[in-house]
Amino acid sequence: MKEKHTVEDVKNKSVYVSTYGCQMNINDSERMYSLLEMANYTPVSTPDQASLIIINSCSVREKPVHKVHSEVGRYRKLKQKNPNLKIGVAGCVAQQEKKKLFKDVPNLDFVFGPDNIDELPSLVSRLEQGDEKFVSARFDHQKPYQIETLIRNPGVASFVNITKGCDNFCTFCVVPFTRGRERSRNLKALITDINALTKRGVKEITLLGQNVNSYKSDCGVGFSGLLKAVAEDTNVERIRYTTSHPKDFDRELAEVMQKYREKICDYVHLPVQSGNSEVLERMNRGYTREEFIDKALMIKECIPGVSFSSDIIVGFPGETEKQFEDTLTLLDEVQFDSIYAYKYSARPFTKAAKFEDQLTEKEKTARLHKLFDYHNVIATRLSRKFVGTTLKVLIETFDEKTGRVMGRSSQNKVVHCVGDKKLIGQTVDVKVIQAFAQTLRGELVSQKL
């Protein structure tokens, strides 16, 4: 039976963070928890236990924006029960909507953007002193991007931000407006950060950025140099990164991945968005269909056996049925192991929102279903090639109910097998015995207990 919490049960300083969106947002939420713990706030698992609720929002698509409004509305009863409860909205919706949010959701207390997360302790202090209905959503483009990765319980795998913001201005994307201009962290600070995480037991790190290829340290080192430094100068066992922009992915990066293959995973997330050159031009992506295919072939040549994933948008304004079919045939040519596909959603401030020939929801939904069905056949075939092979799998979790462990291979394949909780954090050999579109099942070959 679910435990009931009265107003008296609510701790004086307890926080619940609800998160939507990308890995950047997940990492930002972890940072919020860490900062608030320093301000004596205790994390809680449900909103009814909290004295402070923060909704870390995403505005890349329209649906998450609606989720923010409906979620804050659901907390109305909690606020009636506990008038001291404070509710804030963070993330991209906060940056996009600012003061407008107070009109749309009256029971909201404060709003702050992605560039203002480190101000959170002082913002909460303002709330404690009686201030309310305030916004902190200004970009500081002059200030160096200097942060320390803050993670309470880092676990086996951890995210590390290397850049923030984006300068590409794809016509469908609101990120440059909600996360600001591109800035990169200092190389030495990143190496120190990663070494500190490995001392806490982290085995794998994922380098995060809106466009990691744009990374450039103040000492002049680019992304390839950063990958090389992380491979050589840290004790981390595995390195991943996301997201890379196809127009900026060069042979040097592929060759670094091949050279340090014992650490850098055989996996590239390369968002194509569309398989038609005319649509790509309207998206302002900076490459053609043919250039994308050539780049994918170059990567496969440099890193034999590399695994690919991609982002795809269906129903972009003016996309014809023939142009959509070009996206399907691109899947045949590039052979993505997995895709993250979405219906186009018009976002504020973006050029595409003003384009004519917006498609209907019915058309976009039909194309999305067709895309997933088409890719599922490809993904299943690609997964089956692993049957009978032995993969090195870094174990991340253990399920007590099934007695199975779960981990990922270097190719980012999720692998399940019978195992022991003691295997968490270890890289073990697993022989694949069954393959599905996105997961593999196997048997332990070696087990180090």
Image (cartoon, rainbow, N blue to C red):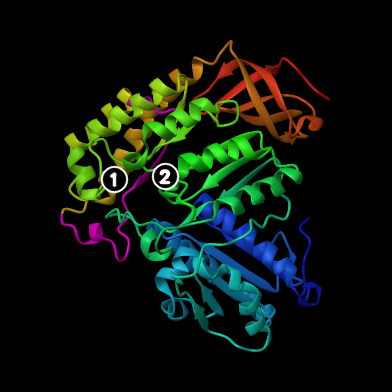
* Membership of 348 in magenta stretch: yes
Residue occupied by mark 1: 364
**In the image, residue 239 above or below residue 2:** above
Quick check: 256 left or right of 280?
A: right
At x 35%, y 28%, the residue is: 296
- Sequence-wise, which precedes: disc 1 or disc 2? 2
Q: Using the rendered image of the protein, determine whether residue 149 is visible from the camera's viewpoint.
A: yes
Secondary structure beneath dot 1 equals helix
Percent coordinates x, y for residue 201 in the rendering: 75, 42
Q: Amino acid under label 2?
A: Asn
Which numbered circle lies on residue 378?
Answer: none
**In the image, residue 26 above or below residue 116:** above
The quadrant of the picture occupied by the C terminus is top right
Q: Amino acid under label 1?
A: Lys
> What residue span does the magenta drawing correspond to?
334-356
> Which residue is farthest right?
449
Would you identify the image quadrant in which residue 14 lies?
A: bottom right
- Choose between 408 and 266: the one closer to the eye: 266
Residue occupied by mark 2: 213
Q: Local crowd at mark 1 within 10 Å, few (<14), some, or many (≥20)? A: many
Q: Local crowd at mark 2 within 10 Å, few (<14), some, or many (≥20)? A: many
Would you identify the image quadrant in which residue 253 lies?
A: top left
